[in-house]
């Protein structure tokens, strides 16, 4: 266990000047010191944090688990805690993501403290989530993309065979879509695809699957219904699209 320097003021000055968020908590998990970077990140003033439990900056559902981890770390043998990613909330209620690492120290009076270093990874986490989404979804419409759709179709076929339940699959496209691009430009074509996708999605059942296969081509996966029911579902979809107002511009 690392003892704190006798000149605690020196450490306080270093913490205060650090460009990353740093907090010191006591054995109970109460804030004893927070630096300006920590306050700026969470949107609190120093006096709003000192003496309060550190769990106030994490979602309520995670507070008991975080408090338990804190107590185990304080009572354990390791002087450093493995860096972990956490979701936290600022004073404004907005969700953020951090990478936190902690060290256990003891002051001149023998009191155990926990020093936690916080790095903001919100932007990086958002990029990771965006890339994960785009790996399975079409960026323009938000629908499943071709690869993810075909993988889902294989899963639905296997489920249908395992439980002997009906499964219907349909493909469709937007008639004369090329004319939209040719006459009004690709921005108008993108708007048509987004609107058509939204209308198709709202017409289908919640557990049906709509996939953009490419261009103006779509696949619809309809689990648990007969061929006749699927035919009626697709007719409702067709009527929904034909009822969509269209611009008269040429």
Image (cartoon, rainbow, N blue to C red):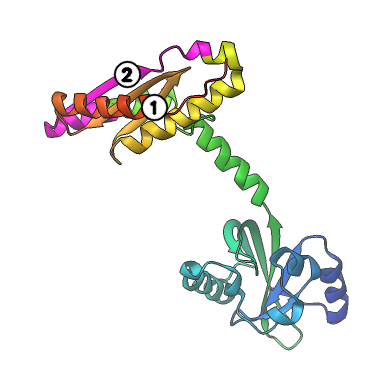
* Percent coordinates x, y for residue 188 in the rendering: 57, 23
Q: Is residue 237 left or right of residue 167?
A: right
- Frontmost residue, 240 versus 109: 240
SS at mark 1? strand
Q: Name the residue that disc number 2 marks.
A: 171
Looking at the image, which residue is at 56% across and 67% down? 58
Residue, far bottom: 109
The quarter holding residue 78 reads bottom right
Residue 71 vertical placement versus 147 (above, below): below
Looking at the image, which residue is at 57% across and 35% down? 131
Residue, far left: 164
SS at mark 2? strand
Looking at the image, which residue is at 88% across and 76% down? 10
- Frontmost residue, 192 versus 214: 192
Looking at the image, which residue is at 16% across and 31% down? 225
Residue 125 vertical placement versus 218 (above, below): below
* Percent coordinates x, y for residue 13 in the rendering: 87, 73
Kindly tell me whether residue 224 is visible in this rendering. Answer: yes
- Frontmost residue, 177 versus 116: 177
Q: Name the residue that disc number 1 marks.
A: 211
* Percent coordinates x, y for residue 2 in the rendering: 72, 72
Kindly tell me whether residue 144 is visible in this rendering. Answer: no
Q: How many residues crowd around disc 2 within 10 Å: few (fewer than 14), some, or many (20 or more)? A: some
Q: How many residues crowd around disc 1 within 10 Å: few (fewer than 14), some, or many (20 or more)? A: many
Q: Which of marks 1 and 2 is nearer the N terminus?
A: 2
The quarter holding residue 242 reads top left
* Percent coordinates x, y for residue 207 in the rendering: 28, 39
Q: Is residue 194 left or right of residue 200?
A: right
Magenta-tinted stretch = 155-179
Q: In this view, does 56 lie to the left or right of 143?
A: right
């Amino acid at each position: 266990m690392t003892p704190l320097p006798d000149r605690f003021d020196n450490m306080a000055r270093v913490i205060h000047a650090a460009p990353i968020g740093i907090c010191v908590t006591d054995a109970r998990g109460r804030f004893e010191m927070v630096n300006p970077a920590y306050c700026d990140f969470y949107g609190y003033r120093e006096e709003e944090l000192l003496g309060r439990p550190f769990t106030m900056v994490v979602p309520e559902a995670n507070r008991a688990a975080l408090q338990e981890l804190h107590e185990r770390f304080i009572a354990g043998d390791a002087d450093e805690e493995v860096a972990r990613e956490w979701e936290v909330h600022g004073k404004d209620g907005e969700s953020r993501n951090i990478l936190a690492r902690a060290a256990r120290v003891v002051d001149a009076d023998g009191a155990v403290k926990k020093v936690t270093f916080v790095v903001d990874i919100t932007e990086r986490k958002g990029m990771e989530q965006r890339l994960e989404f785009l790996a399975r979804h079409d960026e323009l419409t938000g629908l499943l993309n071709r690869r993810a759709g075909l993988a889902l179709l294989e899963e639905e076929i296997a489920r249908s065979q395992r439980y002997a339940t009906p499964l219907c699959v349909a493909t469709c496209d937007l008639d004369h879509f090329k004319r939209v691009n040719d006459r009004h430009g690709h921005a108008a074509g993108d708007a048509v695809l987004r609107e058509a996708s939204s209308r198709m999605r709202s017409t289908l059942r919640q557990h049906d699957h709509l996939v953009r296969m490419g261009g103006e081509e779509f696949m619809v996966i309809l689990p648990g219904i007969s061929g006749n029911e699927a035919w009626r579902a697709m007719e409702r979809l067709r009527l929904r699209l034909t009822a969509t107002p269209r611009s008269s511009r040429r």
